[in-house]
Structures are given as C-alpha cells and as structure tokens.
Amino acid sequence: MLIGLFDALRSEKVPVTLREWLDLMAALEADFAYADLDAFHALARAVLVKDERHFDRFDRAFGRFWNGVSAVAPETFAAIPEEWLRQEFMRHLSDEEKAKIQQLGGLEALMRQFRERLEEQKERHQGGNRWIGTGGTSPFGAGGYHPGGIRVGPQGGGRMAAKVWEQRAYRNLDGDEALSPRNFKTALRRLRKFAREGAAEELDLDGTIAATAREGGMLDVKLRPERHNAVKVLLLLDIGGSMDEHVAVCEALFSAAKSQFKRLEHYYFHNFTYDFLWRDNRRRNSEKTPTTELLRRYNPDYKVVFVGDAAMGPYEITHEGGSVEHWNAEPGAVWFRRIHQHFRRVVWLNPTPVGQWPYSMSTQLVRELVENRMYSLTPAGLAEAMRALS
C-alpha cells in the first residue's frame, strides 16, 4: 500500500531514491512509527526528504496519498486479524483506560461490537455517536471523545498529521514560490566557503585535549579563530524607476545577504552601470564612487551579483550619453564589460518573471553582456545563481 506514497512523491518531483525508500521500510519494521499517523508523517519526511525546499512538495504528496488511503472501503479493514487488534489495543491502554473498558462489558464485548460495526458500516463517517470515523462520541474512532472506547487511528485533540500537510507550513520553501527572507537565506547558504581567520577567540577542544596529553595531564588550553564564511560578495543594486515595485524583495535579499556573508559590499546604480556608483541613495549626488575606484578597491575573487529588472531603453546600454540622469562619455556596455572582465564570477538577478524577458530588448542585451548568467529572483533561480558563482 505504501508504494502509493513513493509514486506520489515522484509525481511531485521530490527527488526520492530507492535507497531512501528502503531506509523508510527498515524504520517501519523497527516500529519507529507504528499505528501513529503523526509519527509516520514525521518519520517519512525525515527519511525521504533531504532538502528543506521540498518540504511543501512532500506535504502535497503525503496529503494526496493519505486521502487515497482514507477512501479505502471499511470492509478492507474488516480483514485485519482480531488477534492483531487485540494485542495492539492492550499494548497502548493504561490501567485507567482498561478500567473504563469494563463500562462496555470488558474487552471481549468491546471487540465484538467493533467487529460488528466494521461489518455493518459501508462508508466513511464523520461525527456522531455510533459509527467508526472521526470526531463525535462513538467508542470507536479518532479525534472525538468517549470515556470507554478505543481510538481507531491517530490521537485526537487536533494532533492529526493532516493538519500539518493541510496548513503546508513549508509552502514558501518551494523553488517555484515567491521569495521570503527564509528562502533567501536557504538559497544563499549554497555559496559558502568556510575558513578560520582573525584573532584566536574560540576554544579548540581537540587541540586542548592533545596539548594537555602532551603535557602529562596539565591543562593546556588552545584557542583558534572563529570559523566563518570566507566568500566575498559585491552586491550591485538597481534603484529607482521600474525597480520601485521590487523594493520589498530587494530589501529582503539585502537583509539575508548581510546575515550570510561577513564580507559583503554593496553599491547602487540606476538602470545600468556607468562611470560611477553610490552607497547612500540620500547622498547619491554628492558621494559618488568612480567605477574605476571600484575595480581598484576589490580583488577579482569577489563574487559580483547585479540585481535589476534590466528594463530600460536599449540606447542606455549601447550609446554614449544614453544615461537618463547624466551625460556618460562612454556607453554603459563598455563599463559593464570592464566590471565583467575584472571579476571572475558575475551573475544578474532579475525580479521580473522569466516569461516577460523575451519581450524586452534591453533584457536580451544584458543577458548577452552577462553571458546568459541572468537568473530569476525566485528560490530556484537564486540557487542556480549561487551555483554559477561557486
């Protein structure tokens, strides 16, 4: 029956393999999630899903699979050997619950009524006080209440795993969904290269143990520099004009980048790059940074990330004097090539939907200049960009 879950996961494009599926079977055989839907949901996700971006797809697949299971006719469950039911019930009942069973005439009478209800019931039931189902006050069911009954299925009280996949708390991690701060951080973590630099302030436990052993048991504390992400990032952001509608997503990206990269530098430009950029939009007219200074200040090992919708007049890229704000003696494309040739890794993130790119001539020009390393500002696109920068 569980092969249906495997098929559902594959149809939702969750990269689950046969090895992971066999691991889940082994975990079930070891009773890690016996007769508990909550536990089975958590176990299956932990074993089968290796990337948190796929949590939402897993919940969709699990929901579709379990809805199919719940649609199975009641007579199917009537084939369960009574001895199996008896042993499982007794294993989970407390002394207090066993005492309450006597209200219905003992376990024998309860099992007899349970079998009769299974034979009589022909459809799924919700609520009420007689049939096997969910809610209500029947002595047989899930999610309801009866002081002397047997719970069929998972625990009640709102703890059903269905609540988890219905709410789909991880939907914003899907690579096809809109970006959120958590999605930004998840994608940016792909661009990491850890190193230990700076002052020795962190306890080196292994070094301390080895040094103490060499000193014959006399404590010899060793310290080491803190481990941090050594990747250096230069973030260049388009500001103003058509980018105003993308301010929120750019702010989220900037905030996430600051939390992920210790060495992050940022500058702004409008529409395209020319002979200068700036760091403070309030002082953009008085505190400018010449692009030539940018190339002198930052080494080629910086990862350069342009963020912009690439929506402008084509002449702003190809012609001198094309800038809408000042007279540029050289075309923007010339300045962009200088940046691209200086730095080893350059990408462009575009917040405009990919389907709209072919309708913008300026977007096509920018894609050519960046050698097709333009990516959509979505979790999937951001992850591809980080791979290109690695």
Image (tube, helix red, strand yellow):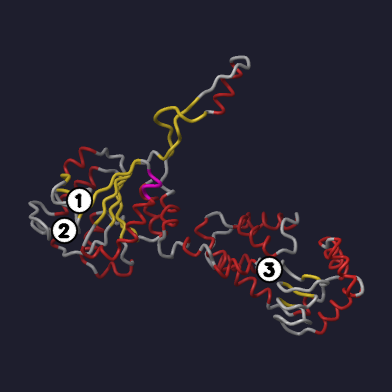
Q: Which residue is mark 2?
A: 317
Report the Cα–Cα distance between label 1 and label 3: 61 Å
Q: Which residues are magenta?
A: 257-261
Q: Which mark is residue 386?
A: none
Q: Is residue 69 above or below residue 172?
A: below
Q: Are marks 1 and 2 in contact (CB under 8 Å)?
A: yes
Return the x and y of residue 73 as percentages of the image width and height.
73, 80
- The question of residue 283 being in magenta is answered with no
Task: Give me the residue at 20% from left, 38% from top.
Answer: 296
- The question of residue 258 being in magenta is answered with yes
Q: Amino acid at mark 2?
A: Ile
Return the x and y of residue 368 as percentages of the image width and height.
24, 57
Q: Helix, strand, or loop for circle 2?
A: helix
Q: Which mark is residue 157?
A: 3
Q: Amino acid at mark 3?
A: Gly
In the image, 324 versus 361, the foreground residue is 324
